[in-house]
Amino acid sequence: VVAGACSGVASIQTQDAFSNIPNVGADSTANLSGTTATFFTDSGCTTSASSVTVTNGTSSQSFYFNATAAGSLTLTAASAGLTSGTQAETITAAAATKLIISTTAQTLSAGSCSSAITVQALDTYNNDTAVGSSTTVNLSGAGASFFTDSLCSTSTSSVTMSSGSGTQNFYVTGAAAGSLTVSIAATGLTGDS
C-alpha cells in the first residue's frame, strides 16, 4: 500500500479450531489496531472506525486502512473470547514532493573541500523516496563553489538525480571564513537550505 493511499479491501473472518469458517451466533465486535494505521469502513477511506462488527449469522466483515509511515505494518483484529488475527502489510513511500540536505552541517577550513553533502528525496509524509524521472537539482550559496567530486576538481552548478534514485551527492568549498548557507532547488519539488 502506498503511504497515504486507501488500501484495497481487507477482511476479518471467523474460524474454529479446525480452520472451518462458522457463522457467529451473535454480533461480534472486532477491535482494529496497527501502529500508524487508521481504519475505515469505506473504500474511499472517509468514514473512520476503530472496530467492525461481524453480524449475527455471518462469518466475515470488511474494512480499509491507510498509513503514512513507510515500512512494515502489522494489523490486528481482536474480539473478546476469540484468538486475535494479524496480517502483515508493507507501506511504500509515495511520490517525491520535496528535497532535503540530509547530511549534518560541516566545519571547513577556507578553501578546503567538504565531505559529501547528500540530497535526499522525500514524499509528503517525510519518507525517503525516489524521484520518478531524471531531476536536476540546482545548487546555490553566496560565496560557495560546488563540485561533483570529492577532490573538488570538477565544478558544477547542479547535480542530477537519476530516475529511480533517492539521493545524490555534491561537494562544496568556501573561500571566506564565516557561515555559508547552501540551498538546493528542483522544478516541481520543495527545496531546502
Image (tube, rainbow, N blue to C red):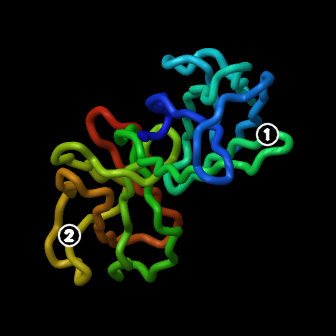
* Residue found at x 63% / y 29%: 59
| For residue 153, above or below residue 132 | below
For disc 1, the marked residue is: 79
Check contact, mark 2 vs mark 1: CB within 8 A.
no
| Most foreground residue, 36 or 42 | 42
Of labels 2 and 1, the one closer to you: 1
| Most foreground residue, 103 or 85 | 85
| For residue 9, above or below residue 168 | above
Q: Is residue 35 visible?
A: no
* Residue found at x 59% / y 16%: 46
Mark drawn on residue 160 = none
| For residue 117, above or below residue 193 | below
Which mark is first along the chain, 1 or 2?
A: 1
| Most foreground residue, 100 or 87 | 87
Q: Amino acid at mark 2?
A: Thr
Q: Secondary structure at mark 2?
A: loop
Q: Position of residue 9 (x, y in %)?
A: 48, 29
Q: Position of residue 159 (x, y in %)?
A: 21, 57
Q: Position of residue 64 (x, y in %)?
A: 55, 28
Left or right, residue 134 beside residue 172:
left
How would you rate the neighbour count of disc 1 (Cα within 10 Å): few for under 14, some for 14-19, many for 20 or more? some
* Residue found at x 76% / y 36%: 31
Left or right, residue 124 beside residue 14:
left
Measure the C-alpha gap from mark 2 to mark 1.
58 Å
* Residue found at x 43% / y 54%: 128
| Quadrant (top left/top right/bottom left/bottom right) for the N terminus | top left
For disc 2, the marked residue is: 148
